[in-house]
Image (spheres, rainbow, N blue to C red):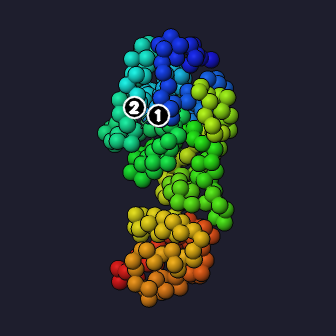
Amino acid sequence: MNDFSTRDIVKKYGFKFTKSLGQNFLIDDSVLIDIVEGAEVGKEDFIIEIGPGVGTLTRELLKRAKRVCAIELDSDLLPILQEELKEFDNFEIVHKDALKVDFKELIGEETSVKVVANLPYYVTTPIIAKLLNEGYNFKSLTIMIQKEVGERIAAKPNTSDYGALSILVQYYCDTKVIRRVSPSSFIPQPKVDSIVVKLDKLQQPRVNVKDEKFYFKVCREAFNMRRKTLWNATKNLGVDSELMKQAFEMADIDPKRRGETLSLQEFGNLANSIYDLAHK
Ligand code: SAM
């Protein structure tokens, strides 16, 4: 499928991998196909790719999308991308740390926006948190991540993987596993197994909450001390204990339970009860 292979491009330019930038480039065509097909990239889509590397996935996106904007931090990759993808007039590169990009500015007037990326693993969670928390109008995020992070994203209550990341992603998105990917699909090979997931943004968040920031704060506190009861874990919220007692009653949640047993909705009920009582 690829007109040029990743290995050939790396060799042609004598590119040296930087481990600290999470540079594991895809060499498996079947994975590329599954990512672009899984992302359902079409002619109306504006695609944001984080970390294009030497442009292997970018090329497939460019063939199918209206426009592709790739955000790359490594300056050594810019001339390679410019040369290898010069036949495309629907391509632009932003030379920046993805964690510092103003996505609102990047998106502009575009209405069909999809993120597609083989993410640098050292910043997976902060990137997902930024993309979801800052309220951009993405339709979906189709991303390659470490398998364990994928398991945390999809985890249900009462499991060891269930935590603040599960709540954050499930609050905003439906999640779907596209496929698993073994280390042999990359050069150099990562030490971990990977997974491609599609996060479809919901029209409305899954839970109706009074104050999103406060909701996530309650969840974080509950998981920061996951071995403790909710009663003890929520002490760090700094809310009066009489008010907390009432809030647990109002939300119909036993304060002796642990945070990891609560569904997203139950966390919502608790956070909303505290909020209502505190704003009476
Ligand atoms: N998309 C390519 C592929 O699939 O072969 C490369 C993926 S590689 C896992 C991650 C890419 O992200 C590298 O090109 C790396 O230089 C880039 N990168 C690392 N940290 C970044 C950051 N903070 N912002 C933007 N790009 C970053």
Q: Quadrant of residue 71?
A: top left
Q: Which of 12/26 is in front? A: 12
Which of 124/248 is in front? Answer: 124
* Residue 251 appears anywhere in the view: no
Q: Residue at x 57, y 74 (%)?
A: 228
Q: Which quadrant of the structure image shows residue 158? A: bottom right
Q: CA distance from mark 2 to mark 1?
A: 8 Å
Residue annotated with mark 1: 21
- The residue at label 2 has a CB less than 8 Å from ligand 1: yes
Coordinates of residue 40 in the picture (x, y in percent): 57, 34
Work out whether residue 98 can be spotted: yes
**x, y percentage for residue 38?**
61, 35
Instruction: Specify the amino acid type for callout 2.
Output: Leu
Q: Quadrant of the C terminus?
A: bottom left
Cβ of disc 1 within 8 Å of ligand 1?
yes
Check the image and report above or below for 54 versus 263: above
Cβ atoms under marks 2 and 1 closer than 8 Å: yes
Q: Is residue 18 left or right of residue 192?
A: left
Question: Residue most toward the top?
Answer: 12
Dot 1: element = helix
Mark sitting on residue 73: 2
Q: Nearer the viewer, mark 2 or mark 1?
A: 1
Task: Give the side of residue 64 with respect to residue 87, left or right.
Answer: right
Which residue is rendered at x = 48% and y = 18% of the image? 15
What's the residue at 51%, 66% (across, down)? 224
Which amino acid type is marked by label 1?
Leu
State the residue at coordinates (40%, 47%).
136
Q: Quadrant of the N terminus?
A: top right
Q: Is residue 27 above or below residue 273?
A: above
Badge 2 density bin: few <14, some 14–19, many ≥20, Cα 10 Å: some
* Label 2 element class: loop
